[in-house]
Image (cartoon, rainbow, N blue to C red):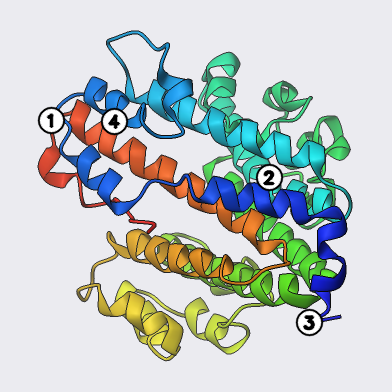
Amino acid sequence: MYGFEAMTFNINDGYLEAIVRGHRAGLLTAADYNNLCQCETLDDIKMHLSATEYGPYLQNEPSPLHTTTIVEKCTLKLVDEYKHMLCQATEPLSTFLEYITYGHMIDNVVLIVTGTLHERDVHELLEKCHPLGMFDSIASLAVAQNMRELYRLVLVDTPLAPYFSECITSEDLDDMNIEIMRNTLYKAYLEDFYKFCQKLGGATAEIMCDLLAFEADRRAVNITINSIGTELTRDDRRKLYSSFGLLYPYGHEELAVCEDIDQVRGVMEKYPPYQSIFVKLAYGESQMLDKAFYEEEVKRLCLAFEQQFHYAVFFAYIRLREQEIRNLMWISECVAQNQKSRVHDSVVFIF
């Protein structure tokens, strides 16, 4: 019941909420980012990070460093924290934490299938997979020729199995089909996660449903922009939109018929929460849209910590840490490629 979480929440979940709020205090601040942006080499970045929670993960790395090493070690820290929380969690928090990783599982499946299609080495692809989205039979994905085989041989035993019912076809896998598969899986995953959060009720449902609705709306906009000028029909496009969110259902009807970025902008400006995102963009420009969405997402994720006795803090923390790793990757790439003038282009400040 909403409002009564305080009476029972701490019995099972109080310790982990304290842990995740402690982890959140270790996120890099604006001052840290300003210092990182001044670095001249990757070793300077390592030296600065040694004073943060990433220190123990980077301290034994020899010079010369590579961007991939920094990202790998920072991701390892996130994975260790996630695994610790999952080991300590009881139901329904353990299921909630597992739901958070399903998005990475979908990305890993798509990465392996796409790489195999382009005749890339499976071991090389496995190294690029996100560690939070790994499962036992992932290497077997390489043998599948179409969606039906993909499901029957590999995915039937994974948590993604229920999401595949909508996209099992006998068509051979090609780039277009794989992208449609990714978006269909994500749609099914988000709708399932949304229903699960509603079932939990209370502050968790209130905050998580808002965060997932934002994610669904962002995906609807991205699908629309990416499918402009392709052979994807309006009906196909509409099928890829999630059946919840601020844009559902009328915004989806309008997005389905958009034929350029300015028409998408016209639809989104009718919704007050999204006006501020599109105000930052010049007409006809979509390059900075991802950054504008990330900034809005970070703002919403930080607000999740303002309330207590709910599970959304776990989702928010993992997402904020992933954003931090994206920031570090961008800064490291700019420093490594001597493009320091562009270092602020894609950094999203968290605090």
Report the number of numbered marks.
Answer: 4
* Of callouts 3 and 2, the N-terminal one: 3
* Of callouts 3 and 1, the N-terminal one: 3
How many residues crowd mark 3 within 10 Å: few (<14), some (14–19), many (20+)? Answer: few
Q: Is residue 104 left or right of residue 94?
A: left
Hey, what amino acid is under mark 4?
Answer: His
> What residue do we see at 38% from left, 64% from top?
295
How many residues crowd mark 2 within 10 Å: few (<14), some (14–19), many (20+)? Answer: some
Helix, strand or loop status at disc 4? helix
Which residue position is annotated with label 1?
A: 338
290 or 94, which lies in front? 94
Residue 72 visible? The answer is yes
In this rendering, which labeled residue sits more in front, label 3 or label 1? 3
Which residue position is annotated with label 2?
A: 101
Q: CA distance from mark 1 to mark 4?
A: 18 Å
Helix, strand or loop status at disc 1? loop
Q: Which mark is residue 3?
A: 3
Which residue position is annotated with label 4?
A: 48
Q: To which quarter of the image does residue 263 belong?
A: bottom left
Q: Is residue 295 left or right of residue 30?
A: right
